[in-house]
Image (cartoon, rainbow, N blue to C red):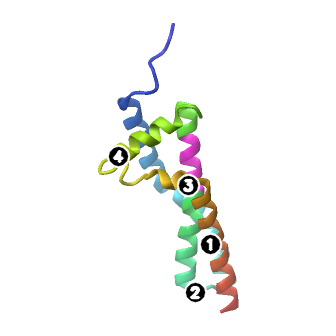
Amino acid sequence: MPGKPTLNERNFRRISRINLLLIPPLFLLFAWPYAILCMMLGLPDPILYSGTFFFSIPLTFTILHGHVTIALGPIHRSFYHYWLHEHKWGYGALLPPVFFTTRLRLILLLVSFGLITVGLLV
């Protein structure tokens, strides 16, 4: 017996809602190790908070990217990103497709490591 198709707007809305609910706990899950390391190294607060943000965001969006891939499959993931692009003033406002690019996530991760290095030198 075939199941319901995964490529419909109702399913895309459900995935977006789940992703939005997953962002805060995942952000906190990935933020605390960086924050504790910065506190142990005695880095200033601006570097601690900005570095924690730059460290946690790419890891959070990697998990969300995996969630979309598991829910839809790697072949149909592009349809979800297209749907987000079409609804940029609604569901796509907080999750633009650029956040799911590997290049941006790696750049943000490298910025967070650079902030630790700058904090140690200052």
Answer whether labels 2 and 3 touch (C-beta < 8 Å). no
Please rate how many residues cluster around mark 4, counting C-alpha atoms within 10 Å: few if below 14, some from 14 to 19, many from 20. Answer: some
Please, what is the three-letter code of the amino acid marked with disc 1? Ser
Please, what is the three-letter code of the amino acid marked with disc 4? Tyr
Please rate how many residues cluster around mark 1, counting C-alpha atoms within 10 Å: few if below 14, some from 14 to 19, many from 20. Answer: many
Relative to 38, is 64 above or below? Answer: above
Please, what is the three-letter code of the amino acid marked with disc 3? Thr
Looking at the rendered structure, the secondary structure element under dot 1 is helix
* Structural distance between the alpha carbons of marks 4 and 1: 28 Å
User: Reading the chain from its start, which is encountered first: label 4 or label 2?
Assistant: 2
Please, what is the three-letter code of the amino acid marked with disc 2? Pro
User: Reading the chain from its start, which is encountered first: label 2 or label 3?
Assistant: 2
- Secondary structure character of the magenta stretch overall: helix
Please rate how many residues cluster around mark 3, counting C-alpha atoms within 10 Å: few if below 14, some from 14 to 19, many from 20. Answer: many
Q: Which residues are magenta?
A: 59-67
User: Marks 4 and 2: which is nearer the front?
Assistant: 4
User: Reading the chain from its start, which is encountered first: label 1 or label 2?
Assistant: 2
The residue that label 3 is drawn on is 60
Which of the pair 33/116 is nearer the observer? Answer: 116
* Structural distance between the alpha carbons of marks 2 and 3: 24 Å
Q: Is residue 121 left or right of residue 75?
A: right
Where is residue 61 shown, x and y percent of the image? 54, 53
The residue that label 2 is drawn on is 44
User: Reading the chain from its start, which is encountered first: label 3 or label 4?
Assistant: 3
The residue that label 4 is drawn on is 91
Residue reaching furthest left? 89
* Structural distance between the alpha carbons of marks 4 and 2: 36 Å
* Structural distance between the alpha carbons of marks 3 and 4: 18 Å
Residue reaching furthest top? 1
